Image (cartoon, rainbow, N blue to C red):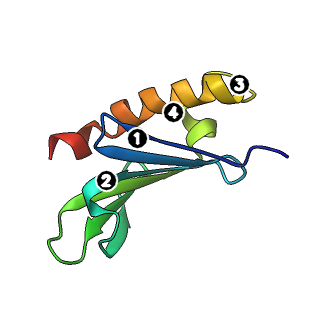
Amino acid sequence: MALTTLEGVHQQVLRYHYDLSGDVLYLRLLGTLDEEVYGEEDPNGFHIMRSYDSDRVVGMTIVGYWRRFGDAPTMPDAASLAAVLEQAAGRLGAPLLAA
């Protein structure tokens, strides 16, 4: 069975979910998983997710994550990719953690 997604939690606050087949990285603050959100694209091409209730930024979606940020032409094995995604969640999700 082929691996299709990887997910985890960064610093017990930020959930990340990576869809390998679509090359999409989803980041979401854990406390907001049940909130309805809407998205808008920022100048970097990230889709910023905001809560309908508070308009607060609660997540982001990065389409083409590996194509844009991957450090090798092919994906690493699952364990190595999990470590890369953990670091990416912290780096790309820093604005979410700071809010």
Front: mark 3 or 2: 2
Identify which amino acid the numbered label 3 is placed on.
Pro
Q: How far, Cα to Cα, is label 1 from label 4?
A: 10 Å
Q: How far, Cα to Cα, is label 3 from label 4?
A: 11 Å
Front: mark 2 or 4: 2
Q: Which residue is drawn at 33% across and 40% down?
A: 93
The earlier-in-sequence mark between 3 and 2 is: 2
- Is residue 9 positioned above or below 75 on the image? below
User: Badges 1 and 2: C-beta atoms under 8 Å apart?
Assistant: yes
Per the image, the residue denoted by label 4 is: 85
* Secondary structure of residue under mark 2: helix
Q: How far, Cα to Cα, is label 1 from label 2?
A: 8 Å
In the image: residue 89, left or right of residue 98: right
Q: How far, Cα to Cα, is label 2 from label 4?
A: 16 Å
* Secondary structure of residue under mark 1: strand
- Is residue 11 positioned above or below 35 on the image? above
The earlier-in-sequence mark between 1 and 2 is: 1
The earlier-in-sequence mark between 2 and 4 is: 2
User: Badges 2 and 4: C-beta atoms under 8 Å apart?
Assistant: no
Which of the 4 quarters of the picture holds residue 58? bottom left
Identify which amino acid the numbered label 1 is placed on.
Val
Q: Residues within 10 Å of mark 1 (few under 14, many from 20)?
A: some
Q: Which residue is drawn at 40% across and 47% down?
A: 15
Residue 68 in the image: state x and y as whole percent: 57, 37
User: Badges 3 and 2: C-beta atoms under 8 Å apart?
Assistant: no
Per the image, the residue denoted by label 3 is: 76
Disc marking residue 30: 2
Front: mark 1 or 4: 1
Q: How far, Cα to Cα, is label 3 from label 1?
A: 20 Å
Per the image, the residue denoted by label 1 is: 9
Q: Residue at x 68, y 46 (%)?
A: 20
